[in-house]
Amino acid sequence: MIVSPVSTAQTATTARAPKAAINADFDTFLKMMTVQMRNQDPLNPVDSADYAVQLATFSGVEQQMKTNQLLDGLASQFGVLGMAQLAAWVGQEARAAVPVYLGTDPVTLTYTPAAQADRAVLVVKNLNGEVVAREDVTVSTEPYEWLGADIAGNPLDNGIYTLSLESYRGEEQLGLPTPVESYAQIMEARSGANGPTLVLQGGIEVAATQISALRVP
């Protein structure tokens, strides 16, 4: 029995279904099948049902490719729609648990003290991770206007700071420090591989999914 190298290679290619076959067009596939037919063993020809299976397999892969292209197109359209919606956010103030830009105006903060706390302390760190202020704040979930002062009570320099909240009952600290959310004006909306990103005042970037509230300044 004579086994054609072309036939053997084609059979292996069909069995493994490599990525290269998925990217081939229909004309190339027909040429490959024609070569296979010409080089088959005349004493043991390939069953016509096998050709039908190959054609059906290629057709299914081709349809899947078209479906994937359609889904990619829809995803792009949804991305544009999302950006169009986010464009309306520019100029508004967004609330998120991200670093805070301190300028000349007070920053509105929101936080949640521990349930049994009778004292709450706002901890302020600079970009080097150094504590530059510890400030007693109200034990409440109401918004708090942070003026930005150091440990000595002097105004902090304009810049970016990281805030966290420590909760106490008497002298005992309750759990670990918790995040503090702040409001900042949205300066820009960008699209990216991980979804839309908003650029806040001071150049602070935050994913649109991390925004917990919006308000008009």
Image (cartoon, rainbow, N blue to C red):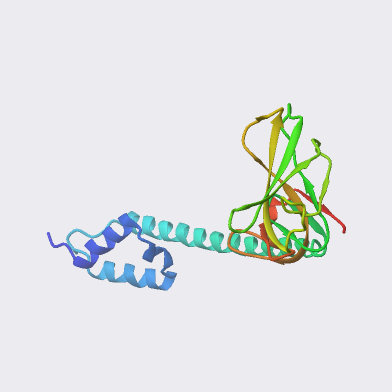
Residue at position x 38%, y 72% in the image: 28
Across and down, in percent, residue 25 comes to 43, 70
Q: Is residue 123 above or below residue 38?
A: above
Which quadrant would the N terminus be assigned to in this image? bottom left
Q: Is residue 187 above or below residue 17?
A: below
Across and down, in percent, residue 18 comes to 35, 60
Q: Is residue 67 above or below residue 142?
A: below
Residue at position x 58%, y 58% in the image: 128
Q: Nearer the viewer, residue 213 or 181?
A: 181
Q: Nearer the viewer, residue 181 or 123?
A: 123
Residue at position x 70%, y 56% in the image: 208
Task: Please indicate whether residue 85 sits to the left or right of residue 131 in the image.
Answer: right
Across and down, in percent, residue 118 comes to 76, 30
Q: Residue furthest right?
A: 217
Task: Please indicate whether residue 215 sits to the left or right of residue 158 in the image.
Answer: right
Task: Please indicate whether residue 182 sits to the left or right of residue 178 in the image.
Answer: right
Quadrant in the rendering for residue 54: bottom left
Q: Residue furthest left?
A: 1
Quadrant in the rendering for residue 43: bottom left
Q: Nearer the viewer, residue 34 or 78?
A: 78
